[in-house]
Structures are given as C-alpha cells and as structure tokens.
Image (tube, rainbow, N blue to C red):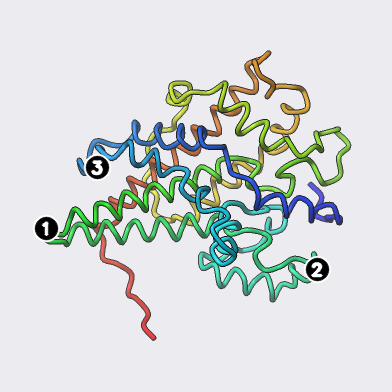
Amino acid sequence: MKKTFGFALFVSLFAAVQLSAWGEKGHLISNEAATIALPAEMPSFFLNAGPELIYLSSDPDRWRGAGESIEAVNAPDHYIDFEYVDGLDLPHDRYKYLHLLETSRLLRRHGLSNSAIGFLPWRIAEMSELLTQQWRLWRAAAPGDRPFIEHAIVNAAGVLAHYVGDAANPDHTTLNNNGWVLANPNGYPIDCDTHWRFETAFVSHAVATADVMPFLSPPVLRADYFQAGMDLIRGSHDLIEELYRLDRDGAFSYPPTRETGKRFAVQRLAAGASVIRDLWWSTYRNSAAPKVRARTR
C-alpha cells in the first residue's frame, strides 16, 4: 500500500473521530461472546457480571460529545491509522510514542496534529494494566472492601472490551476508514457510508452471537498487553482491502445475497471477542504477580 497521502486524507481523518466502531450491536455481540467463553476459574462475581459487561461494551461511544476536553482525549483512543506508523518501533508508553512522532518528523511531513493518527493500542494496554491492578487490589482487600473493588473491575473490563472490539474492525486501523482515499485502481467505494454499511447496518441485521461463538479461538494467556493489541490491529489492517472488495461487490447489502459478507463480519467479531476474553482472563491471572514499582514525583 502506498505511503504517500494526499489532501483527501484530511476528510478521512475528520470522519474517523465521528464514527462508532461496530455500532452498538457489534460491541454487544463481542462482549457477550467473550463472557460466554470465559474460563471457569474466573471469580464468580465476574462470571455473573455478564449483563453489566455487555452493557458497558458501548460506554466509550456514549461519552462522545460530552465536551471539548473529554472529546479530545476520547476520540483518538478508538482508532489508529496504521499506514502512518507501519515500520516504526512503537514504544509501550503513549507519551514516548508522541515523542517519536515528533522526533521522526512524521507529523510535520504529513501536516498532522499529534493526536490525528490515533492511540488505540495504547488505550488497550493502559486499560489492561489498570484492570490487572484492580485485580491485585481485590486479592489483597478485606472482605468488606471487595464489593467496591468488584464494581471497579467490572467497569474497567467492560470499557477495555470496547477498545479491543474497535481493534478487531479493519475500519479502525486505516486511513480508509469511511471510503477509500488512497490510490484506487480497484474501484473501491469512496462514499461516506462504507463504515456504517458494514459495521452497523449489516451487522445489526445479519449477525447474532450464536453465529460468532464457533469461531472463537482457544484461550491464550497474554503477558504483553500492548503487543496483544498491536497483533489484533495488524490482523485487522491486513484485511482492509478484502473488506472494501466485499463492500464493492455488494456483500454487505441486506437482506444478504451471499455468505461472504456475513462470514467476514463474524470472523472479525470472533477475533475481537477472543482477545477480550483473553485479556479479562490474563489480567486476573497476571495479578497474582507483584505490581510494577511505581514512580513518584
């Protein structure tokens, strides 16, 4: 894929912060599938928290439009335009990442603000580390304090899952997030309904949790949360042209006229649900280890 981007990309960048990955039903499906697939060793309060975990799947989208300050933080956490950073040695620290964007002159070269490329893998890592720490607090808490920490754990887990679900959607890993904006010899759709047509209109009508469950992968214990997010993002980004080919050929019309569109959506939702399940389980397991020594001012 070319890495020389024209003025039309600014339309794409603006559109990216206006969109909600998967629509509400897609996020509900991902979180429901993840709760069903949880290992039985998870504490009972978490296994019983399915309805709340499913509801929280869309919370970061509900924060949109709350005000200038929160919008500046929230919007770029939902995506990363991978074309810009492909090939860079990305640090786990979002502020070191911003420093890298400045010192590499990448932002100046493309005329971008420091948040325009997005922060999705950092948000996944940050929320996973927060959840791990909440589990540590729960393990050490007096019985009377545990219910309060359990509430914090479920909230953090549900919000984390939203961003993992975003990472499973190819539209949230690319400049071509709502219509193809790069060189387009294959005639991919350029209208501004491509994002909605796939993740909301089609998924809402054509996909159910029962469709997704058979495609979940076996549980994997994750030690590096940032890498888990990046691996999911790379896998999604590798499929962006397939998504656009399917859309060009009418695979996301409804009622469906072929199985290719549904199969693609189901597999991406299953990929996200698998990593959600893995991170929920891994944060619990990893919390048995001592916490990282904190820096103080």
On the rendered image, what quadrant is the C terminus found in?
Answer: bottom left
Residue at the location (21% across, 57% down)? 138
Q: What kind of residue is marked 2? A: Arg
Q: What kind of residue is marked 3? A: Met
Residue at the location (57% across, 21% down)? 206
Taking the view exactly as shown, the residue that stands out farthest to the top is 257
Q: Counting residues from the N terminus, which is met first, the one under dot 1 or under dot 2?
A: 2
Quarter residue 239 falls in: top right
Q: What kind of residue is marked 1? A: Gly
Residues tagged 1 and 3 counted as in contact (Cβ below 8 A): no
Quarter residue 98 falls in: bottom right
Residue at the location (21% across, 44% down)? 43
Callout 3: few (<14), some (14-19), or many (20+) C-alpha neighbours within 10 Å?
A: some
Which is nearer the eye, 52 or 110?
Answer: 52
Q: Which residue is mark 3?
A: 42
Q: Which element carries disc 2, helix, strand or loop?
A: helix
Which dot marks residue 144? 1
Q: Which residue is mark 2?
A: 109
Residue 204, x across and y down, in percent: 56, 27
Callout 1: few (<14), some (14-19), or many (20+) C-alpha neighbours within 10 Å?
A: few
Pair 1/3: label in front: 1
Taking the view exactly as shown, the residue that stands out farthest to the bottom is 297
